[in-house]
Image (cartoon, rainbow, N blue to C red):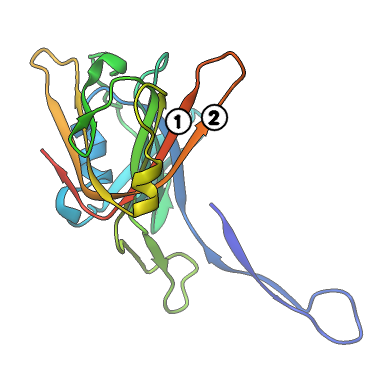
């Protein structure tokens, strides 16, 4: 619950003349293991075709207090997959307000979170990437909290232009992406993930004409030589 203070100095004294709360910005940030992408990620975080980011309510309890964050919109979401970890999402949500409701039973998935075997496709420009050590992708929905009138909390919470981003960390087996970055060439990046439901569901994220922003090769003495590729994009289709 970050707040911004109104401050004003007066002459002839060091004590502030005014110190009051001007703005309060309700927000919630969390990390979750992903079992089913449709539960939250593709429903509220990453919307196909740059569609509207749905407003929703998030409920939270720590055993001491209950909260609901109302009119939430996901500002930023990043999914990361590493060799020895489940698929994880780091999520930042901005809200209009919060209250202290009576909370019922929380629901959860009975299937296990996805891990590296969930990946069925990872490609850059149509070329499959199999020698990855880690990769991640996400969206910045550029959600804004707008303050109007006399209220301390936001009057409006809305999304702006969607910006997609990601990275891939891979071992050096093929030519680097130095030339691609230097030429400013765009590439389609495709990531497909299959969950572990009784009837598995695959979600394919296609970032059309993504721009490769950097390619960095790290030489680590006698250890594995790695390349880190970072990219950004402006178009996403989820199928």
Specify which label sits upstream in the sequence, 2 or 1.
2
Question: In the visual, does 188 lie left or right of 144?
Answer: left
Q: Which residue: 41% across, 64% down?
A: 145
Q: CA distance from mark 2 to mark 1?
A: 6 Å
Which element type, helix, strand or loop, lies under badge 2?
strand
Q: Is residue 102 visible?
A: no
Residue under pointer 1:
227
Q: Secondary structure at mark 1?
A: strand
Residue at image coords 23%, 14%: 111
- Crowding at mark 1 (Cα within 10 Å: few <14, some 14-19, many 20+): many
Residue 67: in sight, yes or no?
yes
Q: Is residue 83 left or right of residue 51?
A: right
Asked if 86 appears above or below 60 in the picture, the reply is above
Check the picture and name the quadrant holding the C terminus: top left
Image coords of residue 130 (percent x, y)? 28, 20
Circle 2 sits on which residue? 218
Position of residue 73 relative to residue 174, above or below, is below
Residue 48, image x, y percentages? 16, 48
Q: Are marks 2 and 1 in contact (CB under 8 Å)?
A: yes
User: Which residue ends up furthest to the bottom in the rendered image?
Assistant: 11
Residue drawn at point x = 21 percent, y = 31 percent:
127
Q: Residue at x 37, y 30 (%)?
A: 135
In percent of width and height, residue 218 lies at: 54, 29
Q: Which quadrant of the structure image shows residue 128?
A: top left
Above-or-below relation of 212 to 63: below
């Amino acid at each position: 619950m970050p707040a911004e203070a109104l401050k004003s100095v007066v002459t002839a004294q060091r004590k502030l003349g005014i110190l009051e709360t001007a703005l309060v910005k309700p927000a919630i940030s969390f990390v979750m293991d992903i079992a089913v992408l449709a539960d939250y990620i593709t429903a509220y975080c990453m919307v196909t075709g740059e569609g509207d980011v749905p407003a929703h309510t998030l409920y939270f309890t720590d055993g001491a207090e209950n909260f609901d964050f109302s009119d939430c919109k996901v500002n930023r979401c990043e999914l990361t997959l590493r060799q020895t970890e489940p698929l994880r999402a780091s999520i930042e949500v901005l809200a209009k307000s919060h209250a202290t409701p009576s909370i019922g039973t929380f629901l959860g998935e009975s299937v296990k979170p996805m891990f590296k075997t969930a990946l069925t496709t990872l490609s850059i420009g149509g070329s499959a990437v199999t020698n990855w050590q880690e990769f991640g992708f996400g969206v910045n929905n550029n959600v804004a909290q707008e303050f109007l009138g006399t209220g301390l909390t936001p009057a409006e919470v809305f999304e702006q232009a969607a910006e997609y981003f990601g990275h891939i960390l891979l071992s050096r087996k093929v030519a680097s992406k130095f030339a691609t970055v230097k030429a400013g060439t765009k590439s389609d990046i495709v990531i497909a993930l299959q969950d572990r439901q009784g009837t598995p569901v695959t979600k394919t994220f296609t970032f059309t004409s993504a721009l490769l922003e950097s390619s960095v090769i790290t030489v680590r003495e006698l250890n594995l030589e790695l390349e880190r590729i970072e990219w950004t994009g402006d178009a996403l289709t989820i199928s």
